[in-house]
């Protein structure tokens, strides 16, 4: 019995729905680039229409809206980091626990399959789908950017944006696995997972807008990879990359430990 292929098949439909909807939404957003670029010719006039806090939070004070990659970074990066993380944590927060809620755990336990194998299959499925989601979304956007662009843009910066979004989505996906390993309540898991995503984004906003709360940036993945570093400086900060790696390893270790020690009711 190939658990990995079983999981891939079970989660295929939701993956395709999320991917297609995200690409369509982003395509509609990119169609507004022409009008925004025209407005941006008078940058000060355009930015004056928005609150200062909003301008700084969206990095509109450093991004040039006449450049399609900057436009992409100000809108799509936010879209894929938040909604992509929502997809990731909805995928993983129930990928383990639903075996109990759907009463299929009895079938799995009756087979010569260890709990470690169950976790490994579900972890592999989650990593593959989150990676495929980000790769295909980025590939589609690369095509769209070339369709709507008015001037050349940096491929390096585009790739960094894509990698940054993938890393943020992956962190939340692994956090979802931890939730799923310990809790068998599907609705609670989804609510908790979504809450963590939006709390994480709120903390990143607070760290950006309020100087004395700048320390909050270390507590949320949304602050690890921001548009200023990825697009303007064209780099990924190594300390944040190390934090991401360590946090990912901790989540994986806790997931394996928690599920192997869990008292499963059949």
Image (cartoon, rainbow, N blue to C red):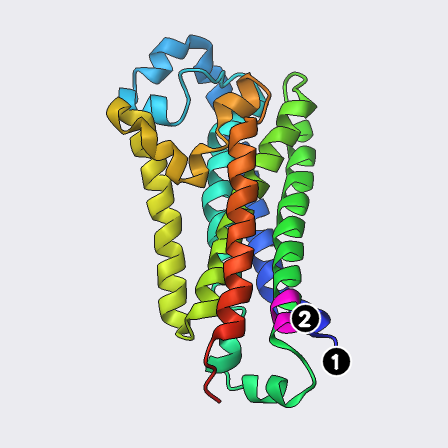
Residue at 54% x, 26% y: name it: 237
Instruction: Say which quadrant the N terminus sits in.
Output: bottom right
* Image-quadrant location for residue 206: top left
**Res 144 → quadrant:** top right
Taking 115 as reference, is 76 above or below it?
A: above
The residue tagged 2 is: 9
Q: Is residue 96 above or below residue 81?
A: below
Residue 247 highlighted magenta (yes or no): no
Closer to the N terminus: mark 2 or mark 1?
Answer: 1
Q: Which mark is residue 1?
A: 1
Report how far apart the C-alphas of labels 2 and 1 lie in the structure: 13 Å
Q: Position of residue 235 (x, y in %)?
A: 59, 22
Label 1: element kind: loop
Horizontal and vertical percent position of residue 210 = 26, 26
What type of secondary structure mainly makes up the magenta span? helix
Q: Is residue 57 above or below residue 130?
A: above
Give, as a single range, the part of the protein colored magenta: 116-120
- Determine if residue 29 is in view: no
Can residue 126 be seen in this snapshot? yes
């Amino acid at each position: 019995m190939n658990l990995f292929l079983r999981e891939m098949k079970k989660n295929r439909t939701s993956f395709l729905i999320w991917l297609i909807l995200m690409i369509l939404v982003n395509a509609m957003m990119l169609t507004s680039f022409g009008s925004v670029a025209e407005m941006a010719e008078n940058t000060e006039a355009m930015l004056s229409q928005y609150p200062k806090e909003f301008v700084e939070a969206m990095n509109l004070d450093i991004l040039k809206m006449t450049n399609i990659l900057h436009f992409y970074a100000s809108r799509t990066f936010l879209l894929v980091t938040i909604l992509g993380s929502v997809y990731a944590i909805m995928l993983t927060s129930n990928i383990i626990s639903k075996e109990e809620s759907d009463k299929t755990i009895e079938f799995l336990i009756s087979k010569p399959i260890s709990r470690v194998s169950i976790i490994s299959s579900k972890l592999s499925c989650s990593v593959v789908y989150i990676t495929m989601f980000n790769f295909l979304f980025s590939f589609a956007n690369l095509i769209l950017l070339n369709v709507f662009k008015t001037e050349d843009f940096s491929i390096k910066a585009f790739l960094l944006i894509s990698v940054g979004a993938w890393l943020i989505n992956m962190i939340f996906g692994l956090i979802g696995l931890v939730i799923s390993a310990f809790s068998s309540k599907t609705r609670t898991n989804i609510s908790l997972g979504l809450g963590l995503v939006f709390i994480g984004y709120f903390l990143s906003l607070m760290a950006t807008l309020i100087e004395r709360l700048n320390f909050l940036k270390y507590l949320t993945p949304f602050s690890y990879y921001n548009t200023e570093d990825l697009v303007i400086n064209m780099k990924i900060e190594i300390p944040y990359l190390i934090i991401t790696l360590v946090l990912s390893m901790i989540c994986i270790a806790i997931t394996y430990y928690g599920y192997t020690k869990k008292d499963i009711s059949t």
